[in-house]
Amino acid sequence: MKRKTMRGQLIGRRVLKTAVAVFITAFLCDLLGWPPVFAVITAIVTIEPTVTQSIKKGFVRFPASAIGSAFAVILIYFFGDSPITYTLATLLTIIVCYRLKLHDGLLVATLTAVAMIEVIHSNLFYSFLIRLGTTTIGLSVSTLVNMFILPPDYSGKIKGKVDQLLSDTGEELAFVVQRMTDGTLDKDLEEAINKRLHASFYETEKLIDLQLADLKYNRLDETSLERLELKETELYYIERIHYHIGNMMDTPFHELQWTKEEKNRLNSMVFMLADFMKNPDDYKKEVYHTQALLLLDRFWESKRPSEDNRTKFFTPEVIILYELLSIFSLAENILDE
């Protein structure tokens, strides 16, 4: 199983596109009689997760490479091929790129500056122009390859992550309510679960942002775009469900006055919802609505008198039932799609 996973990683989209970009870049440089190494270096580091990033970072890497090339040429003129040349080329390139905020171009600029020192000994200005040309080829080829050959598509990953988040959130909901009703909720354990889910939310949101950023370069068909927007909306609802679960955790659940039978009925309702969240294909609207109405009835009946015989509206029972009703409403928006 591990061998199969490793093979899948080695022949992924980005690896294939990098190989294609390197071949085309080297081929074009060979046609022009230019040394391909600098262009190939640029092409390799310019293959980004999205076309947008390739273009955006390309506008940073070109001037950064020009700076590195310029320092290499100037220092070779004064010091020749010597240790001080390598040192100053590296140091000055990093300092200037950093001060100009060309952070995304630091690597390729420094590599270009250092690699040029060994291969340039005459015609310095001509060599400088060739380096700009090879950099341009590397940037252009890698961007075009990223745009037209196996363009980035995260739709499958987004769907899988959103579906998994819905299932994990359902499990979290059932866990929290059961532990609250029996008074054994461990907040440290729940915080660990929250941390894991937050990381998954962040990863999914990042994938959606990457996909949306490339729409102006690689338009999705209408069906794929609708699916992406649907998953984006579902993610929003799941985040809201997670928010309401957090609110329940802050409730003083040790003060709950429900009987054991009432707690069991509440757990049954929550387990039903959690099952639907984990298995949306088994969702039954009539059953769901029946349980939601029962929960609503319990909400209105949950007010109890306080010790001074005045009605205390915001009891732990009222708060928990309100949060659960909110969760039921949000989950229905997902399950009804």
Image: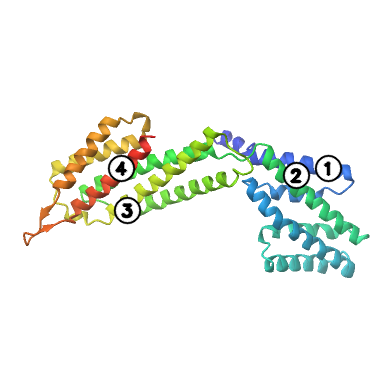
Residue 298, percent from left and from top: 17, 44
Which structural element holds mark 1? helix
Residue closest to the eye, 216 or 72: 216
Q: What numbered label is drawn on residue 164?
A: none
The residue pinned by badge 1 equals 28
Q: Are marks 1 and 4 in contact (CB under 8 Å)?
A: no
The residue pinned by badge 2 equals 141
Q: What numbered label is drawn on residue 246?
A: 3
* Amino acid type indicated by mark 2: Val
Q: Is residue 182 left or right of residue 281?
A: left
Residue 191, percent from left and from top: 36, 54
Residue closest to the eye, 8 or 125: 125
- Closest to the camera, between mark 4 and mark 3, is 4
Residue 147 location, quadrant: top right
Q: Residues within 10 Å of mark 4 (few under 14, many from 20)?
A: some
Residue 270, percent from left and from top: 26, 40
Badge 4 or badge 3: first in the primary sequence: 3
Q: Are marks 1 and 2 in contact (CB under 8 Å)?
A: yes
